Structures are given as structure tokens and as C-alpha cells.
Image (cartoon, rainbow, N blue to C red):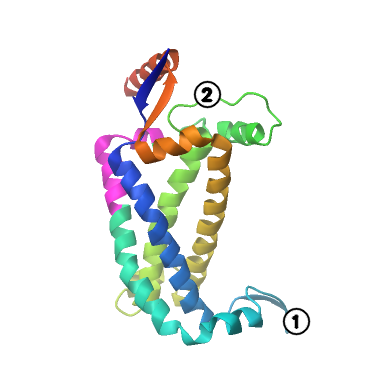
Amino acid sequence: MKKIKEKHSLAMRWTHWVNFPLLTIMIWSGLLIYWANDVYSVTLFGHTYVRFFPKWFYDALSIPHRLSEGMAFHFLFMWFFTLNGIFYVLYTAISGEWRQLLPNKHSFKEAWLVLLHDLHIRKTAPPQDKYNAAQRIAYTAIIIMGFGSVITGLAIYKPVQFYYLAWLCGGYHFARILHFVLTIGYVLFFVIHIVQVILAGWRNFSSVITGFEVVERKKVSAKIKNDENEKN
């Protein structure tokens, strides 16, 4: 027999879906700022082998002339991004959902088994609760990355006023490198996340929209038992 079960709370869904356009705007506007001073490349013995973007890309989008636009959007939406992140962390802490998100001592071993299962090398997936081991690690990492982006961003934004943050990040230039690396990490996370959503199927995706999913009753009973074991 099937049963409708609540899977994701409204607060979790709200922060999830709001964060997607916010992060997209932050990456886009951040790249407009970066493109005004494209300093990162792979250079050996005076010869540049790899640049992140070719010259025709800059010319097509008139990128060198959009610095002020990028700064305006970036410095505005960073506050919404930060507030949304703070609300998410506070909610998980107060509601107790952090217990289902934080990795445990078995997570890294089980995450490898999840990867083998996704690659169809291993037939059966390791047991999971609301989130599997790989998701626990990924979702915890993205929170840490968000915190790192705020700290490094403030160090770049006001290196004199927030000199202690700049010092903590290893100086202005290293803070900028860390900020850039974190941006690449967001893009990689987004790509992997989309692939995982496709592999998980429509039922899993729809539950992030509606907050509910249809499951077998015996699975619901097992879920309740697991929740009780975690609380004990």
C-alpha cells in the first residue's frame, strides 16, 4: 500500500529554490567583475598556455565595459545570498534537521559505495535515510563554501575596513584566488547536482517542489524506526 509522506519542509524548499537564482546572479555578476581584470592563466616561462576565456568571447559580450554593472549586481545580491544562507543554517539548527545533513563516521565510506552504484559498477546502493552519504557530504560542503565565499568576498570588498578578514584569508590577492576557486566549485556542484537529479527521477524532483512523496507503507515504517533510533 502506498502512502503520501512529507519529505521536505517549506523552509528547506524556500531556501533551496531562492538560492538557485541568487547564486546564478552572483556568479554572473562576479564574472563581470573578474573579466575587467582577467589575471588568472596557466603561464610557464613567460608563455601563456591557457586562459579561461578567449578574446572573441570578451568582444562578443562587450565584457570589458560592464565592470560597474557587475559590481552593482554583486554587491546588492550578496546581502540576499548571505541572509538566505543564515536563515537556512538557523532553521536546520533549530529544527534539528542538521542531524540528517551532517556526515557521520560512515559517510565517507558509504559515499564511495553511492558513487559505484551511480556508475552502475555496484548493483545495490548502501542504505540511506532522507539523504544518502554522498548528499550529506555535498550539502555540508556547500554550506562551508557559502561561508567561505562571504568571508573572502568581504575581504575583497573592503580590504581596509575588514583587514582582519583579509589577514585571515592570507591577504587580498590570496582571498581573491580563494573566491574564484569557490566560484568554480559552485559551477561543478551545480553540474553534478543536475546529473544526480536526473538519475534520481521525477518523483525525487517533484518532492522538492511539493514537499511530499509517495512511498510504500513498509518503507514509511522503516523510516519512522530509523528516526527513532537516531533520536535515541
Ranked by sequence position, the earlier of labels 2 and 1 is 1
Q: Quadrant of the C terminus?
A: top left
| 76 lies left or right of 120 | left
Q: Residue at x 47, y 34 (%)?
A: 204
Q: Is 95 included in the stretch rendered in magenta?
A: yes
Count of numbered tags: 2
Q: Residue at x 39, y 78 (%)?
A: 71
Q: Quadrant of the N terminus?
A: top left
The kind of residue tagged 2 is Pro
Marks 2 and 1, Cα distance to the nearest angstrom? 52 Å
Say which residue label 2 marks. Answer: 127
Of residues 3 and 170, the one nearer the viewer is: 3
Q: Main secondary structure of the magenta part?
A: helix
Q: Residues within 10 Å of mark 2 (few under 14, many from 20)?
A: few
Query: Can the viewer see residue 175?
Result: no
The kind of residue tagged 1 is Phe
Which structural element holds mark 1? loop
| 192 lies left or right of 45 | left
Q: Are marks 2 and 1 in contact (CB under 8 Å)?
A: no
Q: Report the magenta residues as a range.
A: 86-100
Q: Is 112 included in the stretch rendered in magenta?
A: no
Say which residue label 1 marks. Answer: 45
